[in-house]
Amino acid sequence: MNLKDFIRSIPDYPKKGILFRDITTLIKNEKAFKETINQIVDKSKKFEFNKIAAVESRGFVFASAISYILDKPFIMLRKKNKLPAEVHSIDFELEYGTATIEVHKDSIEKNDKVLIIDDLIATGGTAKAAAELIQISGGKVAAFIFVINLFDLNGFQNLINENFKVEYLIDFPGN
C-alpha cells in the first residue's frame, strides 16, 4: 500500500504559500490508518524507550494508538494553557509563526527514554521544542518517528545533525 496515495495536499493553508499535507484522508481510511500504525510500530522496534510522547494535535492520533499497542505510557505535549497542573513550557518558531508547547512536570521522570511521534516534520521547530521539553523534564529523546517528512524543508536533516535518531514513513516536497 502506498500511503502517499492517502495524503491530500491543500494549497495556501494555513496561509498563502504553504502547501498543507492533510492526514485526515489517511486516517479516515481504516486500511491506510492500520498500515500507518503498523509501520510506526515496526520502526519503533529499532529503539529502546519506556514512554511515548506526541505534539498536539495530529500527533496524538498516531501516538495514542502506538501507546496502546506497545503498552507504553503516552505523554501529551500540548499547546499553551491546555494542561491543568504545573508545566514545563517552551516557545519556538514555526514556518508560519510562533507557538508554545507544554508538558506536565510530573509526566517524565529522570532518565525516561521517550519516543516522540508526530504526523509531519517540516523545518523541525516543533520537534526541537518537543525534545527540549523532554530534556528539561529529565528525560532523554530515544528517537522521533514522523508519518511525513517534507524533505526540502530540512527538518529531518536538522534533527540528524543534532544527533537525534529519526525515522519517517513517507516524504513529500514542502511546496
Image: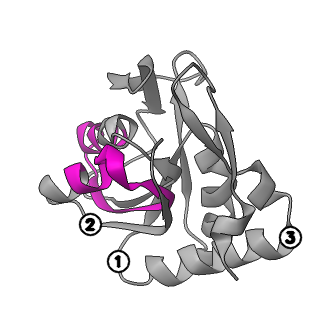
Q: Position of residue 170 (x, y in %)?
A: 51, 67
Residue 90 seen in the figure: no
Residue 91 drawn above or below residue 105: above
The percent position of residue 160, horizontal first and vertical second, equals 20, 59
Q: Position of residue 89 (x, y in %)?
A: 37, 23
**Is 136 a magenta residue?**
yes
How packed mark 1 is, by other alpha carbons closer than 10 Å (few <14, some 14-19, many 20 or more), is some
The magenta region covers 130-158
In which quadrant of the rendered view does residue 28 lie? Answer: bottom right
Residue on which disc 2 sits = 165
Q: Nearer the viewer, mark 1 or mark 2?
A: 2
Number of the label disc, if any, that sits on residue 30 = 3
- Looking at the rendered image, the quarter that the N terminus falls into is bottom right
Label whose residue precedes the other's in the sequence (3 or 2): 3
Q: What residue is shown at x 34% (from left), y 39% (from top)?
A: 123
Circles 1 and 2, Cβ within 8 Å, touching? The answer is yes
Q: Find numbered disc 2 in the image and state the secondary structure of the residue it sits on.
A: loop
Q: Nearer the viewer, mark 3 or mark 1?
A: 3
Which labelled disc corresponds to residue 47? 1
Q: CA distance from mark 1 to mark 2?
A: 9 Å
How far is mark 3 from mark 1, CA to CA? 27 Å
Q: Find residue 118 and report its horizontal and vertical position in percent.
A: 52, 52
Q: Residue at x 61, y 73 (%)?
A: 71
Crowding around mark 3 (Cα neighbors within 10 Å: few <14, some 14 to 19, many 20+) is: few
- Left or right, 8 with reference to 56: right
Marks 3 and 1, the one that precedes in the sequence: 3
Q: Residue at x 45, y 76 (%)?
A: 44
Label of residue 144 in the image: none
Is there any visible trace of residue 110 in the rendered image? yes
Secondary structure type for disc 3: helix
The residue drawn where x is 24% and y is 52% is 159
Q: Amino acid at mark 2?
A: Lys
